[in-house]
Amino acid sequence: MYDEVRQLLPDLHYIYAFDNVAFPYGEKSEEFIVERVVEIVTAVQERYPLALAIIACNTASTVSLPALREKFAFPVVGVVPAIKPAARLTTNGVVGLLATRGTVRRPYTHELVARFASECKIEMLGSAELVELAEAKLHGHPVELEELRKILRPWLRMKEPPDTVVLGCTHFPLLEEELLQVLPEGTRLIDSGAAIARRTVWLLEHESPKALSSDENIAFCMGLTPEIAQLTPVLQRYGFPRLEKLAVCSDFE
């Protein structure tokens, strides 16, 4: 998603905050997620006045956007599963939603289906293991295709599997290459990255026109462990030369 936004807006100061301590959010309570996300955005805002924030997590977006928009004056962009475009693209009428178990369970997701894909057959598959595989790939570990096959087995056994799959977690585009090797040939993978980038451009043009900055990009983690420090070369390739721990009011156990 960051790549999509940066392609359209290369001259901004980007701050990437990731919660490696409480991850993954898909298995947490809604109350916890709202409190945690508001706390993290507040901590970033206190150090760097923000022109806009993107909550690059489907689970966090579906539960925390009202609280964030009430607290902050700058625009807050949320990410929701790309069910609407998938419903338009499917040929066989079967759309797969690959997400965390939390996103699959939440009423908001089912409301999206009812609004935009009522004429499609929606096959939902919730997995925390896929998030772990994506994180492992970021750390340089190979993705075992057999593990993917086990996770996707409910679809692979279907007589008519989804021909269009919504990547309903912002980690999952990291696994696009491997997913295409395992899913039936011709399967389309859809995510929200391009739409979020276009929305961000519009909001910055209309609500934060002075967002341009020459400041150096910075990445924040919630716990600076040796394992997380190994991500520094990856972050540098994405244009984040610095990685620091973000001080938040409470530590998650």
Image: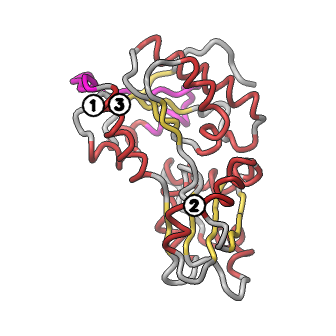
Given the image, on which type of amino acid does mark 3 rest?
Tyr
Residue 197's spot in the image, x, y percent? Answer: 37, 46
Kindly tell me whether residue 118 is visible in this rendering.
Answer: yes
Q: Residue furthest bottom?
A: 159
Residue 5's spot in the image, x, y percent? Answer: 34, 44
Position of residue 245 relative to residue 133, above or below, is: above
Position of residue 101 relative to residue 209, above or below, is: below
Residue 78's spot in the image, x, y percent? Answer: 53, 39
Residues at badges 1 and 3 in contact (C-beta under 8 Å)?
A: yes
Q: Which residue has dot 1 on it?
A: 12
As drawn, the label of residue 14 is 3
Position of residue 216 relative to residue 48, above or below, is: below
Label 2 CA crowd tier, 10 Å (few <14, some 14–19, many 20+): many
Label 3 CA crowd tier, 10 Å (few <14, some 14–19, many 20+): some
As drawn, the label of residue 83 is 2
Residues at badges 3 and 2 in contact (C-beta under 8 Å)?
A: no
User: Residue at image x 69%, y 47%?
Assistant: 108
As drawn, the label of residue 235 is none
Residue 219's spot in the image, x, y percent? Answer: 42, 29
Q: Quadrant of residue 238?
A: top left
Towards the viewer: 118 or 65: 118
Label located before the other in sequence (3 or 2): 3
* Marker count (numbered): 3
* Nearest-to-viewer mark from 2 and 1: 2
Q: Secondary structure at mark 2?
A: helix
- For the record, the magenta segment spans 209-231
Label 1 CA crowd tier, 10 Å (few <14, some 14–19, many 20+): some
Residue 172 on the magenta segment:
no
Q: In the displayed structure, does residue 19 sit left or right of residue 253?
A: left
